[in-house]
Image: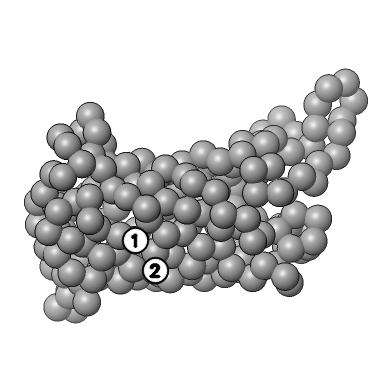
Amino acid sequence: MSSTATVAPGLTAGTWNIDPAHSEVTFSIRHLMTKVRGSFTEFSGAVQIAEELAESTATAEIKMASLDTRNADRDAHVRSSDVLDVENHPTMTFATKGVRAEGGEYLLDGDLTIRGVTRPVTLTVEFHGVGEDPWGGTRAGFSATTTINRKDWGIEFNVPLKGEGALLGDKVDIQLEVQAVRA
């Protein structure tokens, strides 16, 4: 499928607003010998579906203070200037630069801004279809994933461990589960 492929079946052109009550923004990072998972509970965004896939866009804004790893002390530290510096950088944003289909997958290329640093990322997107909801709306479902290196966004905090280990891994896996409602 080329980057000028038409939109996925049932996904009509127009604005589709992310429904935060039925969507999730989650992440995981290695902490010691396991992974810690967390989420951001406050976010918004929209998908603008164009007649041609390559012309579609998506934007999202995530409130960094809404970070939740199920541990209040850890959350406070991650929000601090050591890690996310929420006081000076209250939001993380994403805006597409391009959409393409390759080998049966949709790829969303865009700019991710964390701590005032903007870098390119590619999200692998799975489209789950379109359907009517019980309230008279039309919804589309998507899952998206990407992996980033936190150091690329200036997040350097770590604690060395005995030997060559460190408290935190550099790799952060990001997962999105999105329900979007046709405006």
Question: Does any portion of residue 116 appear in the rendered image?
Answer: yes
Q: CA distance from mark 2 to mark 1?
A: 7 Å
Residue located at (20% from left, 41% from top): 3
What amino acid type is highlighted by mark number 1? Ala
- Image-based side of 82 in relation to 106, left or right: right
Q: Residues within 10 Å of mark 1 (few under 14, many from 20)?
A: many
Q: How is the image coloured?
A: one colour
Q: Which residue in the structure is indicated by mark 1?
A: 58
Residue appearing at x 29%, y 64% in the figure: 47
Query: Please, what secondary structure does the residue beneath circle 2 have?
Result: strand
Q: Pointer 2 and pointer 1: residues touching (CB < 8 Å)?
A: yes
Q: Between 105 and 75, which is closer to the camera in this rendering?
A: 105
Q: Quadrant of the C terminus?
A: bottom left
Instruction: Tell me the crowding category of disc 2: few under 14, some 14 to 19, or many 20 or more residues within 10 angstroms, Cα based.
Output: some
Across and down, in percent, residue 17 comes to 30, 71
Residue 126: in sight, yes or no?
Answer: no
Dot label at residue 45: 2
Tag shown at residue 1: none
Residue 141, picture quadrant: bottom left
Instruction: Where is residue 5? Give x, y as percent.
Output: 13, 44
- Helix, strand or loop under label 1: strand
- Closer to the camera: disc 2 or disc 1? 1
Q: In the shown orientation, is residue 129 left or right of residue 109? A: left
Question: Measured from the top left, where is residue 110 in percent x and y?
Answer: 42, 51
Point 56% across, 41% down: residue: 148
Q: Is tag 2's residue or tag 1's residue first in the polypeptide sequence?
A: 2
